[in-house]
Amino acid sequence: MNQILVDSSVWIAFFRGSLPRDGIFNLIDANQICTNDLVLSEIVPALLMRKERSLVETLARLDRSALSIEWQEIISYQVKNLQKGIHKAGIADLIIMQNVIQNNLLLFTLDTHFKLMSDVFPLKLYNG
């Protein structure tokens, strides 16, 4: 099975307790979760401010999907999004989508615009 990149929206819901913990823990135990530096840069600062060092260390041990940003592709993604009426995808989201597609990963997200983009691009979503 493909590894699953967990988006910051899922991590935030998980940390707040609004997402069932068993699902994430099962994926971690099965070594199916990966992250990237962009997702970590979105969530780690808040964890450090809350002095959640052990959680930061746990996240740092996850497999990392290296980012290889192709800016022309990012531009073409955004143009196609706008043509299809998808207006809520920021550059960070496009980089995450590119990373998932490049590395044949599944994306675990709660952000609805990724579902819209999966109808346009070869973005595979995890439906946990």
Image: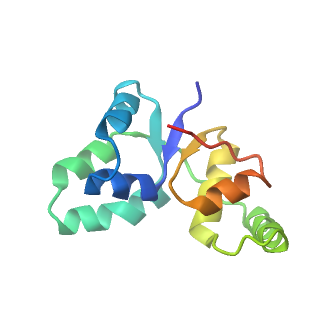
Identify the residue shown where x is 67% and y is 42%: 124
Numbered disc total: 0
Identify the residue shown where x is 81% and y is 72%: 79
Q: Quadrant of residue 45?
A: bottom left
- Can residue 95 be seen here? The reply is no
Percent position of residue 9, x then y: 44, 58
In this rendered view, identify the residue nearer to me: 69 or 35: 35
The color scheme shown is rainbow
Query: Could you tell whether 56 is left or right of 26 in the image?
Result: left
- Can residue 18 be seen here? The reply is yes
In this rendered view, identify the residue nearer to me: 124 or 95: 124
In the displayed structure, 62 sits above or below 66; it is above
Percent position of residue 86, x then y: 73, 70
Q: Quadrant of residue 44?
A: bottom left
Identify the residue shown where x is 40% and y is 63%: 41
In this rendered view, identify the residue nearer to me: 65 or 93: 93
Identify the residue shown where x is 62% and y is 71%: 91
Percent position of residue 74, x then y: 73, 65
Q: Quadrant of residue 68?
A: bottom right
Furthest-left residue in view?
51
Percent position of residue 18, x then y: 32, 53
Image quarter in which the N terminus is found: top right
